[in-house]
Image (spheres, rainbow, N blue to C red):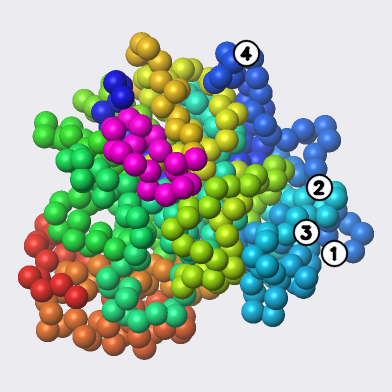
Amino acid sequence: MATPINHVFVLMLENRSFDHIFGFSDITGTDAVTGAPTRANGLDAAAPPANPLPGNASVPASVGDAPFQLSAGNKDPGHEFSNTLVCLCGGGAWSAPNIDADGRLAGNAYPQAAPGLANSGFVANAVDGGSDAPGLVMRSFSREQLPVLNALAREFVLCDAWYSSLPGPTWPNRFFVHAASSAGLDDSPSNMATAEDFALGFDLPNGTIFDRLTSKGLDWKVIEGDAFPQVLAIKGMTAAEANGHFHDIDHLSEVINDPAFNAAYVFIEPDYDVLHNFQGGNSMHPLGDVRRGEQLIKTVYETLHASSVWDSSLLVVLFDEHGGFYDHVAPPVATPPGDTQPGSANNRHNFAFDRLGLRVPCIIASPWVGQNIIDHRPYDHSAIAKTLANLFDLGAPLTARDNAAQGFESLLLNAKRNTPDTLQNPAPGPLAATTATASGADASTAGFAQVALARHLSITPPAAQQAIVDNFNAAAGQPQATAAFLHAAHDAIMQWKQKGRPAPPATQP
């Protein structure tokens, strides 16, 4: 289609629900479809919803008292497939008759919450996870706590009906951004495979949006915040790195201001800091200080705005899943991707991918979108693939999911408008110290170890690769050994980067 947009940038952050970020921000604006005054679908401070505690007590949603960073005792709220089902259907929902003895959906039907119990299990889930303050999952940030996100939402387009692509964790939801599918994966990756499988990468049957761009002769980039970008888990990505598609975030300005820059799509990954149990990263993971994520958003926006490509760009700031934090909207049904069936190799829970996950924050920014727009139309992560296909004429959809999705290119204006050069600074105050080391407690740590394996092998001469494989296999299921493996891979990768990312060995694993 004819469009002023030549470059789409997507910054994907971690583990926050819409209500947790914007529920009490009281954002008003203009409806994206009707043009009428409207209000974002948040929470009512006068009559906030509540979740029950075990016993007769309940915990209402509240604002302004969400901590910038969860302490060790608070625990990262569980957000695996089983945790999310409890959040949506209430305490005790992860049991018969909903679930069989093997942890699979009975008859592969996702259960319906009993009347009055929809989205009632967030506190129960936190209790089950051992949190010493389970009510934290009901707390929302105030506008003053998150000035960067709130400024961006009021200046551009806030989507208040953007859902994660399945009721589950980070890993499969991120695959949906890239492929409108997770190839049946409905939970975090496990160690139930060989090192050789992980080195080859996760196989998405219909390919990815990166493949479609390449087939069309269009360039793309991944901007990485640390040594273990999750996208490297996908089959073929280590080879793509060797072809110059990956760059460090410290070089973002240099990359996009290069006169030869012509990437249609740029996917930006944060610093997860898996080496320190996510504490020092800027991904907005709950175990890290959210203000580091605010600074990342500000830096990306201002770098892009100051660049030569801003006038033809669109920036999407998006979160991957809800992270165990409360949202009051029950997810709708969804179109299954159709590339795998329940019970396939990656499918632990007999899930048919016929329901979306919880709402997550999404902001769309560009000089070609209106000011203070609220878009109530439903989206999920497959809208990224759909919009890229529509903007750049990429052909047939990847799966039935993005075929059924709507893109957001209809938000584009007929004329460019002026946009602010800068955003507010993050909330003041000292950032929490980084003290922990990778413990393996987070279910996604196994996935990051797989990324570390693939990348370490890709930059290592063949004669030394078997030792890396042996160390990976020996570390499986052992938190301290996994931490040691991650640190060793990180050191090798950083040394490789400091040498200017020399060409990988001729023989790949």
Residue type at mark 2 is: Ala
Q: Position of residue 360 (x, y in %)?
A: 56, 43
Label at residue 90: 3
Q: Residue furthest right?
A: 56
Query: Could you tell me what secondary structure mostly forms the magenta stretch?
Result: helix
The residue identified by callout 2 is: 50
> Relative to the observer, which residue lies in front, 356 or 490?
356
The residue identified by callout 1 is: 54
Mark 4 burial class by Cα count in 10 Å: few <14, some 14-19, many 20+: few
First-in-chain label (3 vs 2): 2
> Relative to the observer, which residue lies in front, 22 or 494?
22
- Chain part drawn in magenta: 386-404
Which residue: 57% across, 35% down? Answer: 378
Quarter of the image where one finds residue 132:
bottom right
Does residue 66 appear in this view?
Answer: no
Label at residue 79: none
Q: Position of residue 77 (x, y in %)?
A: 63, 61
Residue type at mark 3 is: Gly
